[in-house]
Image: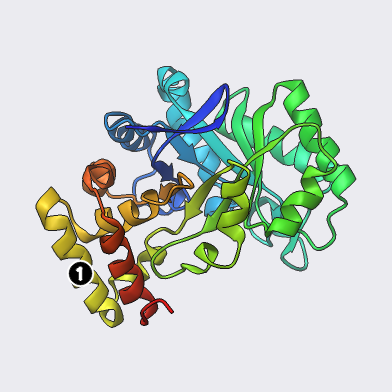
């Protein structure tokens, strides 16, 4: 599998395994989580996407259980995590309202807790999870720089930031922001035309795409025409509609890295099928037209 180069010394697998539902599985045992990781690794998927808030602040600990039971896996993985959302669940159950916290104190405490929960000594890529309307970019930037300097975090980036949020934070940092993880799919194609993707492409910053299958909504009855087209395009490659939908994102020259999540081992075993698909420019626009419901102007 090709790699997505985020920095001269750092890359992600082109497809990233998303762990946002890891703690929701009926089986969260270390052995079952290890099987998921090994199924990814066997396909060349070496990058794993986490966040402190996933599973009500429990998903990182579920991953940590597997890494403690099978410590040899850690050196084969790039671990991505996020912080900055405070929701009234789990360890933050006492807070009065869901909010964002991008203060240096919160970011540092969150990273320390994530390292403890996952049983690791370094996060490979830390993202600020959401833009914070109260963000003091100087404070936040200094915290991220400090975490990289300390060795607790290897690289930093953001998630769900608009270009102006990105440049504001970057203006106060010495360390480059190496990615922006944004929602992109056939059902959420706005970033292809609203400037979000162009901003990253201009700067050679690799975008990560969350919910690349629309959170499963792609396969709802209302999208049967699109699914039929995806299925037909997948047949020559021996893959299903989901693989073609992921390949549609990967065909873009910005080198998008989709974050794909499922708890089913059989589905995990097919995640790399997207790499088998080659789409022509006409194929790409045929899917885009079907998804948006109108031909391009």
Q: Residue at x 65, y 31 (%)?
A: 155
Taking 64 as reference, is 290 left or right? left
Q: Residue at x 49, y 47 (%)?
A: 254
The vertical placement of 136 against 221, above or below, is above
Measured from the top left, where is residue 23 in percent x and y? 45, 49
Which residue is label 1 attached to?
229
Measured from the top left, where is residue 251 in percent x and y? 36, 50
Measured from the top left, where is residue 61 in percent x and y? 54, 38
The vertical placement of 48 against 102, above or below, is above
Taking 287 as reference, is 254 left or right? right
Q: Give the structural element (helix, strand or loop) at label 1.
A: helix
Q: Quadrant of residue 130?
A: bottom right
The vertical placement of 182 against 169, above or below, is below
Count residues near mark 1 (Cα–Cα under 10 Å), then give few for <14, some for 14-19, many for 20+: some
Quadrant the C terminus occupies: bottom left
The vertical placement of 297 against 26, above or below, is below
Kindly tell me whether residue 131 is visible in this rendering: no
Quadrant the N terminus occupies: top left
Taking 251 as reference, is 254 left or right? right
Q: Residue at x 39, y 43 (%)?
A: 28
Measured from the top left, where is residue 105 in percent x and y? 84, 41
């Amino acid at each position: 599998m090709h790699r997505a180069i985020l920095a001269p010394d750092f890359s992600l697998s082109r497809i990233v395994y998303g762990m946002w539902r890891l703690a929701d599985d009926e089986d969260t045992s270390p052995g079952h989580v290890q099987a998921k990781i090994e199924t990814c690794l066997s396909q060349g998927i070496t990058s794993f996407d986490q966040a402190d808030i996933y599973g009500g602040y429990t998903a990182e600990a579920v991953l940590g259980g597997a890494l403690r039971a099978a410590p040899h896996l850690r050196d084969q993985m790039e671990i991505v995590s996020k912080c900055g959302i405070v929701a009234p669940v789990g360890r933050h159950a006492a807070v009065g309202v869901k909010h964002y916290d991008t203060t240096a104190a919160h970011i540092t405490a969150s990273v320390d807790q994530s390292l403890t929960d996952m049983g690791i000594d370094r996060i490979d890529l830390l993202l600020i999870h959401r833009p914070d309307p109260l963000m003091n970019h100087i404070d936040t930037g200094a915290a991220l720089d400090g975490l990289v300097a300390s060795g607790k975090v290897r690289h930093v980036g953001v998630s769900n930031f608009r270009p102006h949020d990105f440049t504001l934070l970057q203006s106060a940092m010495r360390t480059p922001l190496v990615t922006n993880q944004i929602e992109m799919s056939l059902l959420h194609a706005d970033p292809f035309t609203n400037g979000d993707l162009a901003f990253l492409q201009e700067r050679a910053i690799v975008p990560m795409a969350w919910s690349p299958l629309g959170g499963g909504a792609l396969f709802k009855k209302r999208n049967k025409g699109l699914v039929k087209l995806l299925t037909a395009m997948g047949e020559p490659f021996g893959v299903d509609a989901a693989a073609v939908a992921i390949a549609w994102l990967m065909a873009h020259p910005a080198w998008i890295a989709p974050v794909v999540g499922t708890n089913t081992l059989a589905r995990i075993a097919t995640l790399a099928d997207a790499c088998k698909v080659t789409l022509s420019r006409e194929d790409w626009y045929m899917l885009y037209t079907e998804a948006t419901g109108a031909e391009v102007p």
